[in-house]
Amino acid sequence: MPERSPQTNGLLMIRITLEVPSKDAKSLLVALEEQEAKRFSSKIEEKEGFLVISVEAEDATAARALLNTYLRILQAVEDVNKVV
């Protein structure tokens, strides 16, 4: 379940962290970019064999849209790796 945390501007933000196990997480960092917009921001890092994607969003719709973008990219990378 998303974690809600108070922000200085009085809005509640949705905070989600997704940990994806990966043998080559560092190479996935190249395919993904951290995003920042009015309604959301993200941070991506490699940590102990995991690709860690952290998302903060003003609402569930923004969080879902950003996570879906990352998941589509990860799926495309996985599909390419199956072919190669």
Image (cartoon, helix red, strand yellow):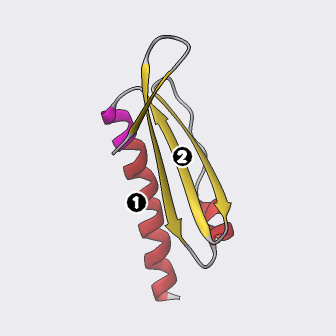
Q: Residue at coordinates 37% horizontally, 41% vertically from top-left?
A: 2
Q: Please tell me whether the stretch drawn in magenta is mainly helix, strand or loop.
A: helix
Query: Amino acid type of disc 1?
Result: Arg
Quick one: label 1 or label 2, which is nearer the N terminus?
2
- Where is residue 45? Give x, y as percent: 65, 55
Q: Residue at coordinates 63% horizontally, 76% vertically from top-left?
A: 24
Query: Amino acid type of disc 2?
Result: Ser
Q: Is residue 49 left or right of residue 64?
A: right
Along the line of sight, the residue nearer the viewer: 13 or 80: 13
Q: How many numbered marks are there?
A: 2
Give the residue at mark 2: 54
Q: Is residue 70 left or right of residue 24?
A: left
17 magenta-colored: no
Give the residues in magenta.
Answer: 60-64
Give the residue at mark 1: 72
**Residue 7 to residue 32: above or below:** above
